[in-house]
């Protein structure tokens, strides 16, 4: 049975999430750490990491390759268990669940968008989008309407019957976004969603992500090396030394004209180091996803 976890109290009231009523964080990480055994001892990738994510908020995670950004996404998405620390989703202890319950939680509550789409090549765009609902036990007849609605909203109304090989890179990525939203998850995790797209297509995707976070009041955590996408985010966090550093102010100051200067103030969790308060970076041989 899952164990409730109370979020640590904020240092004063936090402002509400953009375009949504004041509320608590949907995702609360406390003291998250992840280490891997090596021939020379333990390799610490994440250590003592704290994070609050709020509904309707777009959070960008930046940092050098090899600092553990994909490892962080895997922990936040419950694809891997931490070595230490806790993660609460809507007040419920995520890692108190067994493996079967954890798989059901991921399907119901978390949406994933990977850099290389991972669409099923033998299925159409519509069938790919409907797949999470089918895995959850639904029928295609009941999933069909929402899948069509999502694809139409992402500008793919005329491409629903096409297989991934018949779609452009940008279209495939939008299908992946629609698939991630199929079960109406409270949290969507993205790993370099525009890494393989041209500038114009990437900008359209960035605008769609911001719109979706507002319209659906969903939380997005996006790992990116794209400064334009980072500048659009409500918060920009740099992963350095196994911990998150809030660098939103510096990204705001250097944001391009199309950046986030007009965005409302996002909620800010009290558990992040200030910009400049960085720890020495822990070495990591690669930023590949780890299982």
Image (cartoon, helix red, strand yellow):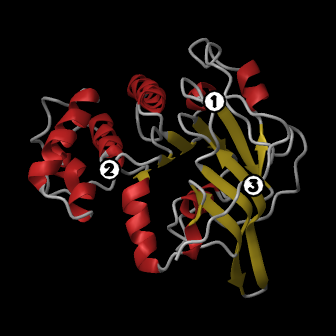
Quadrant in which residue 49 is drawn: bottom right
Residue 151 to residue 80: above or below? above
Left or right of residue 181: residue 29: right
Mark toward the start of the polypeptide (2 vs 3): 3
Mark carried by residue 234: 1
Q: Position of residue 103 (x, y in %)?
A: 40, 70
Assign a secondary structure to mark 1.
loop
Left or right of residue 58: residue 271: right
Viewer can see residue 98? yes
Q: Position of residue 119 (x, y in %)?
A: 27, 54
- Considering depth in this image, is 236 or 66 the residue closer to the camera? 236
Q: Position of residue 206 (x, y in %)?
A: 47, 28
Mark toward the start of the polypeptide (3 vs 1): 3
Determine the CA span between mark 1 and mark 2.
24 Å
Label 2 crowd (10 A; few <14 / some 14-19 / many >=20): many
Mark carried by residue 50: 3
Q: Name the residue beneath numbered marker 2.
A: 183
């Amino acid at each position: 049975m899952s164990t409730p976890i109370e979020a640590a109290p904020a240092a004063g009231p936090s402002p509400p999430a953009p375009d949504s009523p004041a509320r608590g964080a949907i995702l609360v990480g406390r003291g998250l750490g992840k280490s891997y055994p090596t021939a020379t001892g333990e390799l610490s990738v994440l250590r003592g990491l704290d994070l609050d994510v709020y509904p309707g908020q777009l959070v960008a995670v930046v940092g050098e390759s090899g600092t553990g950004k994909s490892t962080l996404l895997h922990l936040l998405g419950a694809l891997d268990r931490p070595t230490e620390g806790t993660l609460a989703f809507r007040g419920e202890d995520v890692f108190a669940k067994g493996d079967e319950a954890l798989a059901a939680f991921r399907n119901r509550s978390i949406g994933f968008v990977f850099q290389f789409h991972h669409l099923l090549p033998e299925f159409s765009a519509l069938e790919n989008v409907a797949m999470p609902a089918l895995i959850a036990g639904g029928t295609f007849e009941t999933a069909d309407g929402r899948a069509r609605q999502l694809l139409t909203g992402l500008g793919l109304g005329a491409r629903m019957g096409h297989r991934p090989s018949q779609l452009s890179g940008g279209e495939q990525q939008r299908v992946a976004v629609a698939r991630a939203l199929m079960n109406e998850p409270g949290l969507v995790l993205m790993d370099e969603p525009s890494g393989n797209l041209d500038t114009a297509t990437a900008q359209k995707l960035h605008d769609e992500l911001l719109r979706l976070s507002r319209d659906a009041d969903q939380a997005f955590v996006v790992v990116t090396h794209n400064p334009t996408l980072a500048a659009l985010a409500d918060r920009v966090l740099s992963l350095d030394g196994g911990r998150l550093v809030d660098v939103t102010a510096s990204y705001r100051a250097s944001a391009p004209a199309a950046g986030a200067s007009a965005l409302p103030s996002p909620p800010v969790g009290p558990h992040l180091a200030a910009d400049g308060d960085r720890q020495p970076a822990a070495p990591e041989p690669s930023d590949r996803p780890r299982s």
